Structures are given as C-alpha cells and as structure tokens.
Amino acid sequence: MQADRGLDVAVLIGLQAAGKSTFYAQYLSGRYALVSKDLFPRAARNKQQRQMRLMEESLAAGRPVALDNTNPSPQEWGPLVGLAHAHDATVTAYWFPPDVEGSLRRNAAREGRDRVPDVGIFATLKRLRKPALSDGFDTVTEVRFDGHGGFEARQILGDRKT
C-alpha cells in the first residue's frame, strides 16, 4: 500500500537501550515528527492516548511521524498501524534485533530517568516479536550498529526502498 500523500509512519521496535533514539536522531530527525512516551512527564496519565493524539495531529497536518518506544508486539503497534492507514500513510517498521548484553551494557551507562531497571529489559524481551508485513507494515527495515558510531539499515521485507 503506497500512501497517497507520501506520508510515512516509522515505528521503532526493540529493547530499551537498543539504539532507537540515537537512530532517530541520526537518520529520521528533521524529516519525521518525534513521538516518544519517554518525553512525557513521568506522572502523565493515559500515555497511550496522548501518543495517539500526537500521532493524529502530525498526520492530519501532513507530517510523517516516528514512534520511538519499545513497541514490542502487535498489542502496541497495532493501533499505530491502524491510525497510519486511516490517514493513507505507509508504515515502516524499524526492527532492532535483540542484543540483551549490549542493551544491558548501554543501559548501565545511562543516568537518572534514562536508566531503566534491568528487569524492564527482560520483561520487554519476553514480549518482543519481529514485525512482519502481515502485521500491516508496508516495509520492515532491520537496524544494527555498524561498529563506527552509526547504523546499518537494511530493508528485509516490503516493496518500498528506505
């Protein structure tokens, strides 16, 4: 499904400390509006509703949007895919294959609010599922660290080149 208006929704999928926010900053920032629950106040209620509202506002304004959360399963990404398609937008899954040791190491170097309890990484790992076209994604792109401070992004499913 190709979007009529050229809109795309980027759904970042991976463990905490997998590099999703850094990838957004290096490759999507400036082209995609950012929606991340990490940017909401800790005490904020209804984070999912707020995320959906911000996504809706961006799409209604004709702006591509990136959702930078763990998004580990269809329970989380299903509503995002549905809203994107309701706006005739394509949906690109950016899949960060799990590297538990790497996530734990990078998380340990974080400070304050950015650091999550290790148990959170393991809880996300239990729910984490690789996205597929059958989930409504138009493209699935696998993202890995390149060993030089950047990333290698390789389309693994879909017709559209990223």
Image (cartoon, helix red, strand yellow):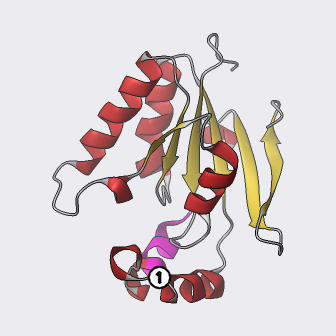
Chain part drawn in magenta = 121-128
Q: Position of residue 87 (x, y in %)?
A: 49, 17
Which residue is outermost to the top? 4
Give the residue displayed 74% in from the left and 59% down from the top.
Answer: 143
Q: Main secondary structure of the magenta part?
A: helix
Task: Using residue 128 as the reference point, say whether residue 101 is left or right of it.
Answer: right
Q: Is residue 9 above or below residue 2?
A: below
The answer to if 9 sits in the magenta stretch is no
* Residue under label 1: 110
Quadrant of the rendered structure where residue 30 is?
Answer: top right
Q: Is residue 76 above or below residue 87?
A: below
Task: Using residue 137 as the reference point, say whether residue 55 is left or right of it.
Answer: left
Q: Is residue 82 above or below residue 99?
A: above
Q: Position of residue 104 (x, y in %)?
A: 55, 86
Q: Position of residue 73 (x, y in %)?
A: 49, 56
Check disc 1 and give the amino acid type.
Answer: Arg
For label 1, the crowd category at 10 Å Cα-Cα, with few meaning under 14, some 14 to 19 and many 20 or more, is few
Mark 1 lies on a secondary structure that is loop
